[in-house]
Amino acid sequence: TMAVLQHRAKLSIVPIFTTCLSFITTTTRSMSLVPRRKFNKKPAGVLFDLDGTLLDTEPLGCQAVYLTMQDKMSDEAKQAFADRNYAMEWTLKQKTLGLPDRKWPPIVLAWAQEHWGVTLVPTVDEFLEQWDSHMIQNMAGVEALPGAKELIQQFAVTDRLPCAIATSSRSQAVQQKRQHHEDMFRH
């Protein structure tokens, strides 16, 4: 499994990120992972964000917000969600992306009052309990993003670099997300 990198060497994020991007090239026949640029030093390891980088969890999170709030919101707000394929408004999404569990729900709840016609607002704990329940149900359908498995294979197997996940998700949520993609997380 991927383990947290505990390496005393200084890691330079920019070269690692640049290396990630430079490995991806496409050909007319298939995707090939070939380095375009050489660095003087081999990176000590590779850190990946999980949500929205390796796994396509963002739509599931939006759906869980909708399912949590749907019986509290106006019919107009429900229709707007349906029209956006149950995605949250980008203006709201920008404010919440990457925030830890206790930070983003108050933003969503305030938005719900102002924009979705919600008058009976749940507490953050009530919201998170319902949201978690919907996310657990949705996790069976989470898909790897295109190229994620190949990129991890390149770094972990071909280049023999330690790989790890850096995420703000709780450990239980990470386990649920990994469940259907163990081949990607065994390195």
Image (spheres, helix red, strand yellow):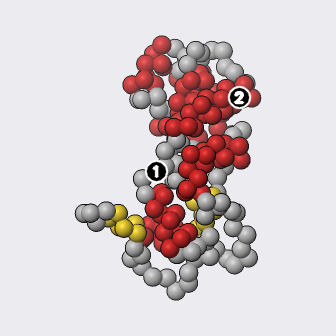
- Give the residue furthest to the bottom: 40
Residue at horizontal 49 percent and vertical 32 percent from the top:
88
Residue at horizontal 26 percent and vertical 63 percent from the top:
29
Q: Nearer the viewer, residue 34 or 20?
A: 34
Location of the C terminus by quadrant is: bottom right
Q: Which residue is mark 2?
A: 129
* x and y, in percent, of residue 128 in the image: 69, 31
Q: Which residue is mark 1?
A: 145
Q: Is residue 114 visible?
A: no
Above or below: residue 1 compared with residue 105: below
Mark 1 closeness class: few <14, some 14–19, many ≥20 residues within 10 Å: some
Residue at horizontal 61 percent and vertical 34 percent from the top:
135
Name which quarter of the figure residue 85 lies in: top left
**Which numbered disc flags the more N-terminal residue, 2 or 1?**
2
Q: Is disc 1 placed on a helix, strand or loop? A: loop
Question: Of the residues shown, which amino acid type is indicated by label 2?
Answer: Glu
Residue at horizontal 47 percent and vertical 63 percent from the top:
151
* x and y, in percent, of residue 74 in the image: 52, 14
